[in-house]
Amino acid sequence: MNIKNNELDGWLVINKDLGMTSRQVVNIVKNKLNVKKIGHAGTLDPLATGVLALALGKATKTVKYIMDGMKKYEFTIKWGISTDTQDAEGSIISESKKKPKKEEIKNLIKNLVGYIEQTPPKFSAIKINGIRAYKLARKGKNFKLKPRKVFLKKIRIIEKKAIEKNCTSFEIECGKGFYVRSLARDICKNLNVDGYIVKLKRIESVPFNLESSISIKDFLKLYEKNDWKNFFLPIYSVLNKIKYVGK
């Protein structure tokens, strides 16, 4: 592909690494490609990995349509410990030796499908009077977040080889505004057990998936060889794949 940087109107799908913030990924690509407009469709937590779709140039105007699309995640809950962030980044708030049985989990999750009222995590980017919730939570401030209606299309238990003991893995398909950490919190609450997410990966953000993605490490290698454009998706090639998903 012979593309000049001022003609970069399209998408680059990054397979985000563990420990990186979404903003760090954006900044790396922005600096390397020297583009003025760049954004991403859906933040991933630092401890989450997987599909992070970057919009370049005029494609930034279509981000809202990607945000409206369905997402697929794989995540693993480790039983026995609860943290204040619902993941490994937080502080332990409770512990127990109780572990739910597989049948108990199955009976619960089949009732979670559809439109549900979900309260976002306090450690999230939602703004409270102009201040990010996670900033208030880190300062120990007392506040409440309002429940929001979200959509869970599918949820199932998946078998993982060589997984840690006392863990259960899931795959879900959900709509916009859905918090996997909140789902894990609510699963633990309903089962009356402690647990937190030890692994979280976004495997699809319609119309993007892992197969069309590239890691930052490989992007930087290919950039030096001027071969990265094989992963660039022009805006016209994506527009006809976007399906609007209403509320």
Image (cartoon, rainbow, N blue to C red):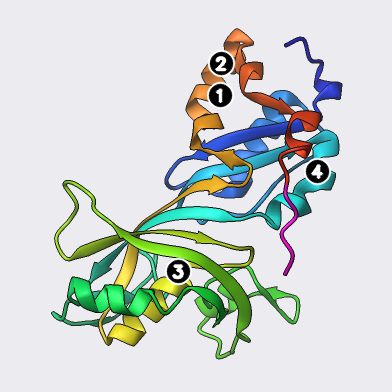
Mark drawn on residue 181: 3
Within 10 Å of disc 3 (Cα), the crowding (few <14, some 14-19, many 20+) is many
Residue 225 placement (x, y as % from top left) = 59, 8
Disc 1 vs disc 3: Cβ atoms closer than 8 Å? Answer: no
Mark toward the viewer: 2 or 4: 4
Closer to the chain start, of discs 1 and 3, is 3
Label 3: which secondary element: helix
Label 2: which secondary element: helix
Amino acid type shown at disc 3: Arg
Mark toward the viewer: 2 or 3: 3
Magenta stretch, residue numbers: 243-247
Locate the N terminus by quadrant: top right
User: Residue sitting at 52 percent across and 68 percent down?
Assistant: 152
Q: Is residue 217 above or below residue 189?
A: above
Closer to the chain start, of discs 2 and 3, is 3
- In the image: residue 34, left or right of residue 23: right
